Image (spheres, rainbow, N blue to C red):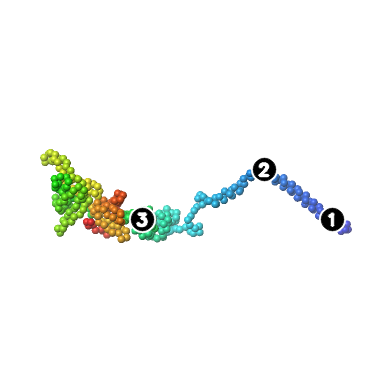
């Protein structure tokens, strides 16, 4: 014990040395094990390519997708992600105005309403006229026009409606060849009640002239109205005379109904009917006017837009665009009151 006390400092120094030797031995053995487990790569020749890094490749690929996202990966919306989708209550059901196939206003696509910025909450939207061009939203949609530009609108004739009709028969009689040749003819109009009675004075017509309807009223006043009938030609034909049982030469005239381009032939003394109709057309635009027409008569809606009345029935009228030749149907005006018959234009 006395020895330990006398040599305490030396013993402590010896013990410290032994600990350091043990630590050094452990470190050397651990380094040798690590070196055997992780072999350093073989030295590369200058210019050799590095092996592809799989993880780095995947990251680079995803970075490219983020820079230019494809539509298959991203769904695009023209609205904020922080604003709720818009739904409207229709017939007790919520309608998604962006996605639903149900039309907010029958006859008008939802997409068309949204495209032109119309107020889809307005219950009267279909009948409104935002650009004040005389056409409603539903009329603009049907024609493929813009509801917010008065430069884009449907054809003006689509605003016409038939308000009244008067369908008669125009009776004509071929009287004679006054000069004995085929250059001029004598024609008269005949009473519808009594085909043997003439309604007015006879008229003489040359080729190409229009027939005039001459009538005398109960008060004795005579009225004259142009008709759609045109004298086209006169010629001689051979026809069997049943009284003599022999052929004889008789004059025949041809009249053209310019309203429908149908021809009428009359032999001397013969009476025939031709459709003769009157119609009242109404321009339903604001401030639009009424016009009374006979078949074959021409008229204008706007300057430079000429039309001709071709045919009339109780349900509709047919007009012809003078520029294109297209025939157009004008429906009956839907009103509660009974329209008055048109008068002679």
- Residue 181 visible (yes or no): yes
Label 2: which secondary element: loop
- Depth order, front residue of 325/57: 325
Q: Quick one: quadrant of the N terminus? A: bottom right
Identified at 36% across, 60% down, the residue is 132
Report the disc number at residue 45. 2
Report the disc number at residue 11. 1
Query: First in sequence: mark 2 or mark 1?
Result: 1
Report the disc number at residue 153. 3
Q: Quick one: quadrant of the C terminus? A: bottom left
Identified at 27% across, 54% down, the residue is 299
Query: First in sequence: mark 3 or mark 2?
Result: 2
Label 1: which secondary element: helix
Q: Is residue 184 left or right of residue 128?
A: left
Residue farthest to the left? Answer: 244
State which mark lies toward you, 3 or 2.
2
Q: Position of residue 62 (x, y in %)?
A: 56, 50
Identified at 17% across, 47% down, the residue is 184
Q: Position of residue 28 (x, y in %)?
A: 76, 49
Query: First in sequence: mark 1 or mark 3?
Result: 1
Question: Marks 3 and 2: CB-CB under 8 Å?
Answer: no
Q: Position of residue 261 (x, y in %)?
A: 24, 47
State which mark lies toward you, 2 or 1.
2
Q: Which image quarter: residue 42? A: top right
- Depth order, front residue of 184/306: 184
Q: Measure the alpha-carbon separation of dots 3 and 2.
A: 78 Å
């Amino acid at each position: 014990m006395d020895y330990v006390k006398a040599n305490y400092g030396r013993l402590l120094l010896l013990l410290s040395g032994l600990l350091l030797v043990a630590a050094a031995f452990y470190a050397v053995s651990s380094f040798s094990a690590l070196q055997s487990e992780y072999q350093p790569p073989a030295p590369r020749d200058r210019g050799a390519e590095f092996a592809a890094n799989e993880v780095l490749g995947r990251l680079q690929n995803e970075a490219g997708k983020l820079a230019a996202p494809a539509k298959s990966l991203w769904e695009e919306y023209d609205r904020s992600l922080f604003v709720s989708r818009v739904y409207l209550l229709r017939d007790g059901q919520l309608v998604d105005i962006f996605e639903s196939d149900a039309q907010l206003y029958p006859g008008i696509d939802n997409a068309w309403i949204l495209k032109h910025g119309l107020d889809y909450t307005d219950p009267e939207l279909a009948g409104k006229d935002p650009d004040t061009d005389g056409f409603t939203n539903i009329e603009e949609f049907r024609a493929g026009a813009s509801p917010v530009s008065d430069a884009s609108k449907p054809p003006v004739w689509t605003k016409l409606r038939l308000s009244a009709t008067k369908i008669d028969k125009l009776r004509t009689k071929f009287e004679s060849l006054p000069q004995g040749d085929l250059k001029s003819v004598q024609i008269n109009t005949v009473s519808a009640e009594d085909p043997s009675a003439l309604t007015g004075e006879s008229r003489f017509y040359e080729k190409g002239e229009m027939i005039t309807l001459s009538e005398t009223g109960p008060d004795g006043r005579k009225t004259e109205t142009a008709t759609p009938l045109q004298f086209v030609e006169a010629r001689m034909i051979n026809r069997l005379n049943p009284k003599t049982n022999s052929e004889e030469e008789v004059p025949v005239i041809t009249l053209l109904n310019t309203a429908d381009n149908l021809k009428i032939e009359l032999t001397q003394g013969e009476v025939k009917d031709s459709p003769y109709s009157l119609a009242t057309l109404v321009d339903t635009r604001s401030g639009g006017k009424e016009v009374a027409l006979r078949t074959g008569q021409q008229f204008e809606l706007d300057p430079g837009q000429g039309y001709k009345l071709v045919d009339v029935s109780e349900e509709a009228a047919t007009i012809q665009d003078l520029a294109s030749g297209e025939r157009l149907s004008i429906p009956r005006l839907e009103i509660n009151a009974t329209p008055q018959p048109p008068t002679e234009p």
